[in-house]
Image (spheres, rainbow, N blue to C red):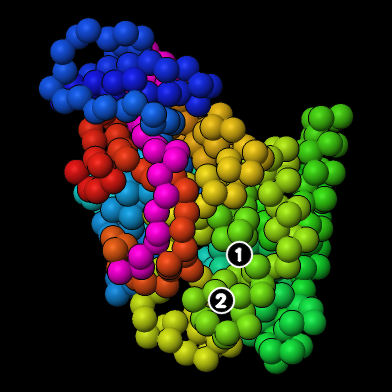
Amino acid sequence: MSTLIKGATLPDGTTTDVLVQDGTIAELGKVTTKAEQTIDADGLRLLPGLVDLHTHLREPGREDAETVLTGSRAAAVGGFTAVLAMANTSPVTDTAEAAERVLDLGRAAGLVDVQPVGAVTKGLAGEELAELGLMARSRAKVRVFSDDGRCVHDPRVMRRALEYVKAFGGVVSQHSQDPSLAGPTACCHEGELSGQLGLPGWPGVAEEVIVARDVMLARHTGSRVHVAHVSTAGSVEVIRWAKAQAERDGHWDVTAEVTPHHLLLTTDLLTGYDPTFKVNPPLRPDDDVRALRAALADGTIDAVATDHAPHARHDKEHAFVDAAFGMLGLETALPVVTTVMVENGLLDWAGVARAMSVNPARIAGLDDAHGRPVAVGEPANLTLVDPAAQVVVDRAASVSLSRNNPWHDRKLTGRIVATLLRGTPTVLEGALA
């Protein structure tokens, strides 16, 4: 199918027609070629398709919470053309066969490119390296490895993992949580509020010491480390310092992501003990949130990643301390970033494209097809956004199987109008095509 996107505004502010044919961008400018389908994009922003570095699709093992198909639907509605599926499934994605199974499920769904993330250690146990090389050489071509949900806390194991993935250009994405400082029951930012609520504290230093250790290991090994879901001002300072060293001597390769919820929500929301807001790492105070926004704006933090973590109702409807960690994020990520960063003048639309498409694609090794410029000859993985539309989030309207949506009843700015995967619309007028 050929599609003409009429009068779209690109990230740099240029307004143009875009003709898509045979999965690629065929023409830009004033297009007179007839197309089978025309999308009126007057007043809309056209971005390279969004890429999520951090998605939990739950399949195999927890299909009651999400499947690759339903998660792909949520991703497409959210403007994503590629997502990285985390490894903490059941069984764990720690073999080549398991990675290829996730890849095949994504291709069968056909709505976004689903790229498996491989576990760093067997069974996420933190002791023995998983089949890193075999996963990298498999049909899935795994390049990102993470024990997300658990920290690779043994420095020797982390060092070996970094040395191993260096051989094929891989990256280790770390869940930074020192288990001796923030144990399995820790569920609230450690501070005055956690004491008042009687909730086990999760101090920021438990994240920061792992971030500091791992950036030094990245320097020592000459390998790549990616800091998942940064949540504290202290972590920001460590990452900023490491990147300054990289500019000086070039021996550091450190990248980082922040979630939409850590850019907007604060620990004050926990006063009602609503388990919807239980997430790992926990929501933090205002000072940390401001530091995260500034770090995304100045490039210290490279990417926005959703950490989309769907849960069945019976896993969330517990006392706060016993409820599962995590919240939904795929369908609302762009509106949250628009509301927090664009409306406050912290990012322009070129910055949004960098943080939600270009940089994530580069970090994940998907930049041959995703995060590409809107230019003739490039793959037509595209997202069309109404930057002025205001939407009130309704958890019941989600296409995810789960309902643990922290944005319910919030008014956000920005609406995904259309998503194109290799030129084929997966979303039109905000709904699945």
| Rendered residue at 63%/83% (across/down) | 271
Left or right: 38 in relation to 231: left
**Residue closer to the observer: 148 or 73:** 73
Q: Please, what secondary structure does the residue beneath circle 1 have?
A: loop
The percent position of residue 386, horizontal first and vertical second, equals: 39, 38
Identify residue type, mark 1: Leu
Identify residue type, mark 2: Lys
Q: In this view, does 69 lie above or below 198?
A: above
Rendered-image quadrant of the N terminus: top left
Left or right: 292 in relation to 273: right
Label located before the other in sequence (1 or 2)? 1
Q: Residues within 10 Å of mark 1 (few under 14, many from 20)?
A: some
Q: Is residue 375 magenta?
A: yes
Q: Is residue 390 magenta?
A: yes
**Residue closer to the observer: 199 or 222:** 199
The percent position of residue 54, horizontal first and vertical second, equals: 50, 54
Q: Residues within 10 Å of mark 2 (few under 14, many from 20)?
A: many
Q: Which residue in the structure is indicated by mark 2?
A: 278
Residue 22 visible in the snapshot = no
| Rendered residue at 70%/52% (across/down) | 292
Mark closer to the observer (1, 2) = 1
Direction left: furthest residue: 36
**Residue closer to the observer: 248 or 128:** 248
Magenta highlight range: 374-396
Q: Which residue in the structure is indicated by mark 1?
A: 265
